[in-house]
Image (cartoon, helix red, strand yellow):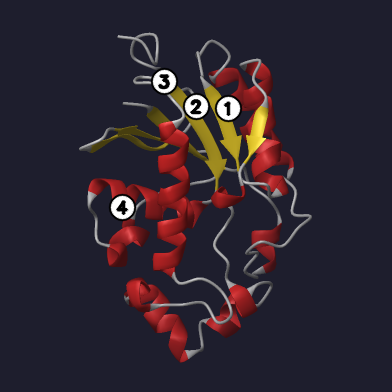
């Protein structure tokens, strides 16, 4: 079964504005985020990755590039790995959104929530899982494959593969610059790592028996 490394992009300054970024373009890594990306590149320098994919958003691409360079791979941008489509909430103040009745649904029953003019959490999960399944289908058993994208989509993917109810997905951790590893098989999936940061200390040459 392929081993998927789900990597959250590095830190950026937009979250400090107190607004929801969604898919806004032009959000770059800050100094700490660039350092996180460099540390990930160093962590993967001797790791035989079969491929690396990323969300097309700048913060994901900028995180993936040092890994791709360290592994001498061509970075493949995949639209299916994009951040959740938060619709009318994109760029809006989180404080104001927290005052809406809908916010309670988002926090307490996300399986019933749809962002106004955007995706539901269930639609995001379905899109991400379909994308990851398609990526897995391209690779051989024990191939090590990296995917760099975003917090909620990563947590929604993990929830799906380990059988965690969607309403509990926000209980999972996914910090900036973190790595989560899933072993994906035809009949089962196993969570090997969750929310790890470098050094990663792979146990054996990864991707090999």
Give the number of the disc on residue 59: none
Q: Residue at x 31, y 52 (%)?
A: 160
Secondary structure beneath disc 3? loop
Q: Residue at x 66, y 30 (%)?
A: 75
Secondary structure beneath disc 1? helix
Mark 3 to mark 1 CA distance (whole Å): 19 Å
User: Which badge, 4 or 3, is on the more N-terminal residue?
Assistant: 3
Residue 24 place in picture, x, y as percent: 72, 62
Contact (Cβ within 8 Å) of mark 2 with mark 1: yes
Secondary structure beneath disc 4? helix
Give the number of the disc on residue 143: 3
Residue under label 2, please give it. Answer: 198
Crowd around label 2: few <14 · some 14–19 · many ≥20 (10 Å): some
Q: Residue at x 36, y 10 (%)?
A: 208
Mark 3 to mark 2 CA distance (whole Å): 20 Å
- 190 with respect to 4 (left or right): left
């Amino acid at each position: 079964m392929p081993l998927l490394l789900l990597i959250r992009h590095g830190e950026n300054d937009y979250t400090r504005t107190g607004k929801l970024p969604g898919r806004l373009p032009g959000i770059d890594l800050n100094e700490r985020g660039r350092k996180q990306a460099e540390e990930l590149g160093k962590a993967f320098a001797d790791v035989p990755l079969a491929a690396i994919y990323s969300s097309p958003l700048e913060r994901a691409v900028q995180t993936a590039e040092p890994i791709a360079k360290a592994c001498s791979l061509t970075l493949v941008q995949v639209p299916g790995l994009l951040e959740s489509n938060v619709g009318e909430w994109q760029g809006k103040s989180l404080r104001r959104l927290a005052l809406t009745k809908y916010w309670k649904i988002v926090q307490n029953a996300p399986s019933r929530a749809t962002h106004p003019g955007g995706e539901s959490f269930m639609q995001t999960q379905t899109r991400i899982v379909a994308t990851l399944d398609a990526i897995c289908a391209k690779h051989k058993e024990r191939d090590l494959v990296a995917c760099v994208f975003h917090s909620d989509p990563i947590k929604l993917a993990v929830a799906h593969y380990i059988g965690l109810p969607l309403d509990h997905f926000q209980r999972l951790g996914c910090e900036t610059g973190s790595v989560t590893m899933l072993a994906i098989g035809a009949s089962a999936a196993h969570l090997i790592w969750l929310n790890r940061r470098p050094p990663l200390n792979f146990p054996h040459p990864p991707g090999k028996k």
